[in-house]
Amino acid sequence: MSTCAVDVRDLFYAYPDGTEALKGISFRIEHGAAVALVGGNGAGKSTLLLHLNGCLPVQRGEVRIGDVPLTRETVTLAQRAVGMVFQDPDDQLFMPTVAEDVAFGPLNAGLSPEQVEARVAAALERVGMAPVRERPPYRLSAGEKRAVAIATVLAMAPDILVMDEPSSYLDPRARRRLIELLRSFEHTRIIATHDLELVVEVCSRVIVLDTGRVVADGPTGQILDDEMLMLAHGLERPHILRHRHPH
Amino acid sequence: MGIANWIEIGRMDELGRMDTPAHRLDARAKAVVTLAFVVIVMSFPRHAVSALTPFLLYPVVLIAVGQIPARHILKKILVAAPFALVIGIFNPFMDRVPVATLGPLVITGGWVSFVSIMFRFVLTVGAALALVACTGLYRLGAGLEQLGVPRVFVMQLLFLYRYLFVVADQGVKMMRGVELRSAGAHALRWRVYGSLIGQLLLRSLDRAERVHGAMLARGFDGKIRVLRQPSFRWTDWGFVGGGLLFLAAARAWNLAEAFGRVLTGMAR
């Protein structure tokens, strides 16, 4: 499909209060890649993510989803191609039951009831949440909420998955399940996170942001193993890489 | 979790998902009858008490057929009671015309109208709660929209309901933060409360924006869609017809008095 690559060129963004969150960001992500966006607090990760499906308007520069530049007119297209998993599942799960929440997107897309039901069942099955389908979302554990939030996005059959801090609030077991799930996806994945160990396991490429700029972009092993680079941008070299070296 | 836990907000959803004859009725049918119920109860003259008693039948039947635990409904009525109390409490002082004597006790018009207000409050709020418990707010919202209530209001209602829980939780967390740092001092200064409430408002607005973003990201265009479109069956027509007939009869005649007359007649 043509809508699978993400191309960001010279993107600038300033919030209404004057804070310059993005100061000229450029990168291209090819179809099927798993890419991590890392950087300290306030580096501009979340602001960048909000651009990818049109939650924030492009002020200067360009965002292309596949061959289509993101504008006010093409926002719907981008929303269909890009599935966004928000940091706080409570922001994403607003319907009375899990099944209805997962059905929300497909229903809005105008699918028939049978198609919607098939999508809901498949998405919940994929994340292992079929047993909780009739429960209200706010009664679920953090790990279950996260899985259901991912299911709501999968049900829209996006080509690109964008996630903001997917492993936050999760206990080790739920985090492990999440990692396995993320590894199993064939979608283009863009993951903003501080969880560098997760990055090592899931992503092949890392983009480091600092104060609104791309300061490094390359293969995961190479970037995260660069202790000087990591420390300079409020990060640290993950343990998992330290122990990989032969002693 | 304080008040949010005590009134068990989430419990209403569980009740609304049960499957009883009362739940199977179409949301529109129940909404129409309940609305008529509220309007008719409110239309009685201000000293009416005995004529209102037959109206208890409607919420009681709904609760019984819907197998809703009455305690749960009563608890919620209690939470709202202070509002009705404030409205009615001045009547006994304003209206001191005696209307009846009970032995040495003189009952004034003010007291009668006060009792009438409280009784109407219990009836209307009880019926509304029974309606929500037997329908579930989401289905009720969809029903209201089909009845022609503007979508904006329906959405407002549904989101107010969904996020009350989350916002209350946020409030509780903030209060805990304050308590932990107020070193056992119980009386908080008003200024602190002011800034707390302001904070809560700002946080809620932020959340509202994020939720809206999440909805748009999933193709929301302002219309709520439900999987199963409800169909209006003959039982629903029966419920509406029977309900309205009962309400009209109870408004036209004082059924309690008539019933009393029948009873005393039989005794004679």
Image (spheres, coloured by chain):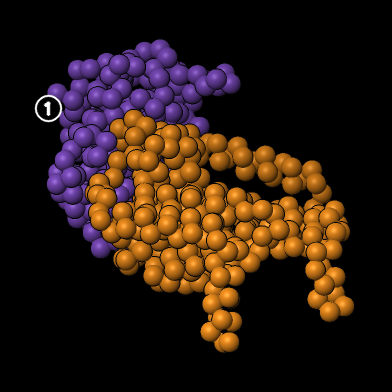
At a point 63% along the width and 67% down the height, the residue shown is B50
* Above/below status of A183 relative to B119: above
Which picture quadrant has residue B152? top left
Q: Is residue A60 visible?
A: yes
Residue B259 screen position, x and y as percent: 54, 73
Q: Residue B228, percent across and down?
A: 24, 49
Q: Which is nearer the eye, B5 or B184?
A: B5
Q: Residue furthest top?
A: A60
The tint of chain A in the picture is purple
Query: What residue lies at 80% left-to-right and 68% top-to-bottom?
Result: B100
Q: Which part of the image, by quadrant, shows the N terminus of chain A? A: top left
Which residue is identified by label 1? A1
- Image location of residue A24, percent across then percent down: 41, 16
Name the residue nearer the viewer: A56 or B258: B258
Crowd class of label 1 (few under 14; some 14 to 19; many from 20; radius 10 Å) = few
- The colour chain B appears in is orange
Tag 1: amino acid: Met
